[in-house]
Image: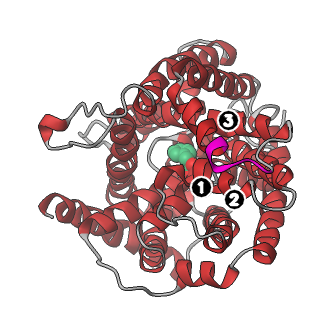
Amino acid sequence: MAGAGTGENSAYPSFSSRIAFIIVTAGSAVGLGNVWGFPYVAGQNGGGGFVLIYLLALALVAAPAFMAELMLGRMGKASPPTALGRLQAKVGSKLHWPLVGWTGLVGTILVLSFYAVIAGQAMDYMLEAAGGGFAGWSDADVQALDANFKSSMPMMALWSAIFMGLTALIVSFDINTGLEQAGKVMMPLLLLILLGMVIYSGNMGDFGKAVDFLFGFHEMEFTPRLFLEAMGQAFFTLGVGVGGIMTYGSYMGRDVNLPRATFWIVAMDVFVALAAGLAIFPLVFSSGVDAAAGPGLVFLTLPLIFADIPGGAVVAFAFFLLLTFAAVTSSISLLSPTVARLEEAGWSRRRGATVMAALVVGISLLTSYSFAGGKDVFPLAALGLGGMTFFDLIREGVSNFILPLSGLAYALMVGWALSREDVRQALPMADGPLFRAWHMVIRYVAPICITALFVGAVAG
Ligand code: PHE
């Protein structure tokens, strides 16, 4: 059996090689958050200064927490609640660690519930482009396509179901046939398309302005909210905090050098986010549309540009295919933890994946509703959260709260509850200054930053 050579419990599945582990886990990290989310969040927050804080949040908080999550998975070798329960017993803690795992599982379902709708729109646009769409369209045509999609709940539900069907299909297989093959096929293609887009965009658009927008310094206000958004984005983009990474960590062989793998995965994730920005913003600036368009940036603003450029349909197809690949390689990691937990309860992977996918499609109706009839329905207005739809509440609730709080929990588990010796043993290849630096970060820097940001956001 693949991965059996890694020693340990050979009945437990394992990715077939180090590189397979890195590719599949990078697939989890690289997702809608990079290609759809990063450009619009950076655009809305004014570019440069936000990007800097985002990179700092990644380096100081999210990436160390990511490594902690992978490590907990490799040590616990089970679904997140079970793995954390084992580790709790091992260290003899009185706190209820599995609760963090269960919260994560709820988080995966919530993320998938809006992921499916956004990815569904990407697939719908891909189909449109495949039929020669976008090229030569008027602004009204583009607006109508977006408006029609977002006003039709049946349409959104149908696409969500197709996307979740595909996700469930991949997850149904054993991990080497399903998750691993999907990553190996889609990730290289994704990188190739992205590079092509950056080159195209650099030639056709205003590259200098895009670089200045993303990396230059601009007058801006550094509010506590901006910090929270940057941290939320950093957690989301790596996928830390819901147990997807922990589950992949459980499939990681002993032969993987964990810090080095973390470095490559984080580097790839940052690269894709910045490259997506460099593919999108040159076109945005050369055509004079608004960089701060918000969540509609890739579905409303970008297609306006595809309509006017040479080869628009081909570029549009490539772009939405890229977005779909990014979404699928992440959604399979989001479905994996619950399926792993159900397997422990004796379910087959196919049954677990099917039932969970169906549940996600049901909950995705909340997001569809927020785009359609419920555009102005703000369920928590009475709690001072006016102006936030179900979608806004789910997206921000997960990114800005569940993920960083779970990250905090992981940091405390690895930094404080597990002994330094346990941690050292889990990382046999790392015992130098870098290990000590990371251990300091996970003990002090990350927990303090997360707590400070929460206090700041609540007080602000
Ligand atoms: N990292 C993914 C993205 O950027 C989303 C994700 C969140 C994946 C949580 C796994 C877990 O789109």
Picture residue at 74% right of the left edge, 47% below the top: 137
Please give left or right for residue 80 compared with residue 180 in the image.
left
Q: Earlier in the sequence, mark 2 or mark 3?
A: 3
Badge 1 element: helix
Q: Disc 2 marks which residue? A: 305
Q: Disc 1 marks which residue? A: 301
Res. 167 image quadrant? top right
Q: Amino acid at mark 1?
A: Thr
Badge 2 element: helix
The mark lying in front, picked from 1 and 3, is 1
Quarter placement of the N terminus? top right
CA–CA distance in space, label 2 to label 1: 7 Å
Query: Which stretch appears magenta?
Result: 136-141
Picture residue at 20% right of the left edge, 43% below the top: 385
The mark lying in front, picked from 2 and 3, is 2
Q: Is residue 382 above or below residue 415?
A: above
Q: Disc 3 marks which residue? A: 9
Q: Is residue 71 visible?
A: no
Q: Is residue 155 visible?
A: yes
Q: Dot 3 surroundings within 10 Å: few (below 14), some, or many (20 or more)?
A: few
Q: Amino acid at mark 3?
A: Asn
CA–CA distance in space, label 2 to label 3: 53 Å
